[in-house]
Amino acid sequence: MDKYDRMLLAALLENGRATYAQLARQVNLSAPAVAERVAKLESSGVITGYTANIDLEKIGLPIQCVIELRLASHGSHDTHHAYAQLASIPQITECHRVTGDPCVIIRAAVVSMLELEALINRVAQLGFTKTSIVLSSAVQRRVPLGHLEGNARKP
């Protein structure tokens, strides 16, 4: 990974549908060089796919939340069962196993407070929950590429 690869990744995160010509102008390389680099990033598994960013509110899901879950049971079978249960809940958009007091951090989107209450009740069957409603997002999904350049941002 050199500075051009990092610049390409940043540009693709901004616009995954950019053409090789557009990317070439952004990173100051030729379109064939960009195509070759993107192909290498894909074949090496750095780029794992391309997605659309969706405004959940505009598709009728105005309430987004983060649910912290501390599982009631921690045996291997119990944990796998809990993750299978969580994976079956359509309102859940992300689910991460984490260190610390909660075992799992969940992001979800719902239509109404009534649906949120039902979701919390369903998740709470697996253990103790703490829910926070997302008011706004200061940072959207991104990859921290600055540290790769040796220019990590200082607090």
Image (tube, rainbow, N blue to C red):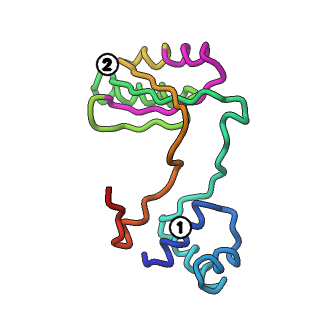
- Cβ–Cβ under 8 Å for marks 2 and 1: no
> Which element is circle 1 on?
helix
- The amino acid type, in three-letter code, at marker 1 is Leu
Q: CA distance from mark 2 to mark 1?
A: 40 Å
Tag 1 residue: 9
Label 1 Cα neighbours within 10 Å, binned few <14 / some 14-19 / many ≥20: many
Q: Is residue 90 above or below residue 4?
A: above
Instruction: State whether residue 153 is above or below residue 52.
Output: below
Q: Quick check: 120 left or right of 55?
A: left
Find disc 2 in the rendering and name its residue.
Answer: 72
What amino acid type should be assigned to the residue bearing mark 2? Ala
Q: Residue at x 36, y 70 (%)?
A: 151
User: Residue placed at 28% from the left, 25% from the top?
Assistant: 74
Q: Nearer the viewer, mark 2 or mark 1?
A: 1
Residue 33, x across and y down, in percent: 60, 84
**Residue span colored magenta:** 102-120
